[in-house]
Image (cartoon, grey):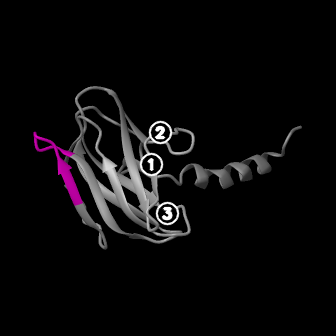
């Protein structure tokens, strides 16, 4: 059966928001690629996908990424965990993202010196205490966001 082109386009347009609704890390320009060793501004985009508020977002920083600073995000408090070398390994933002809203968190970092793929693991906590793990434990339903370094 052949579908008219406009129906295929409409179907794709309706599915696109669902595919893009997960917690994602992209470059400031929205890209999923960056250069090895480059200083980059990244943005973590976290939509609330339930009928209750998101109250906490935890980002596990990929090995080799060196975060240098964060943009202030009004309404959120931020804590960081560092390793013995003083590198940020985890960031937690606490605040409120209501249903049908999203929040963006910007940070500056230096990429690792070797090409490869960065997997950004994000854990989204809701007001009922449930946690959605965007960490590839189930890549089909809760994928980790990835950045390719070239």
- In terms of image quadrants, where is residue 44? bottom left
Instruction: Work out whether 22 lies above or below 116.
Output: below
Magenta highlight on residue 81: yes
At x 56%, y 69%, the residue is 51
Q: Residue placed farthest to the left in the image?
A: 85
How far apart are the two marked residues, 3 and 2, measured between alpha carbons? 20 Å
SS assignment at label 2 = loop
Q: Nearer the viewer, residue 47 or 90?
A: 90
Residue 107, horizontal then vertical, whole percent: 26, 53
Q: Is residue 96 left or right of residue 4?
A: left
Q: Which residues are magenta?
A: 79-88
Q: Earlier in the sequence, mark 1 or mark 3?
A: 3
Residue name at image x 51 percent, y 45 percent: 142
Residue of label 2: 137
Q: x%, y% of residue 45?
A: 41, 56
* Residue identified by numbered label 1: 133
Q: CA distance from mark 1 to mark 3?
A: 13 Å
Quickly name the residue at label 3.
48
- Which image quadrant: the C terminus? top left
Q: Tags 2 and 1 in contact by the CB under 8 Å rule?
A: yes
The spot of residue 8 in percent (x, y) is: 76, 46
From where the camera sits, is residue 114 visible? yes
């Amino acid at each position: 059966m052949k579908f008219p082109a406009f129906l295929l386009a409409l179907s794709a347009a309706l599915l696109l928001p669902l595919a893009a609704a997960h917690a994602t890390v992209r470059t400031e320009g929205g890209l999923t690629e960056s250069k090895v060793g480059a200083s980059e501004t990244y943005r973590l985009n976290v939509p609330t996908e339930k009928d209750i508020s998101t109250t906490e977002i935890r980002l596990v920083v990929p090995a080799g990424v060196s975060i240098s600073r964060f943009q202030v995000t009004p309404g959120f408090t931020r804590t960081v965990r560092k390793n013995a070398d003083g590198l940020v390994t985890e960031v937690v933002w606490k605040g409120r993202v209501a249903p049908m809203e999203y929040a963006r968190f910007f940070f500056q970092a230096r990429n690792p010196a070797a090409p490869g793929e960065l997997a950004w693991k994000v854990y989204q906590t809701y007001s009922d205490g449930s946690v959605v793990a965007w960490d590839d434990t189930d890549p089909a339903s809760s994928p980790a966001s990835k950045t390719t370094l070239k």
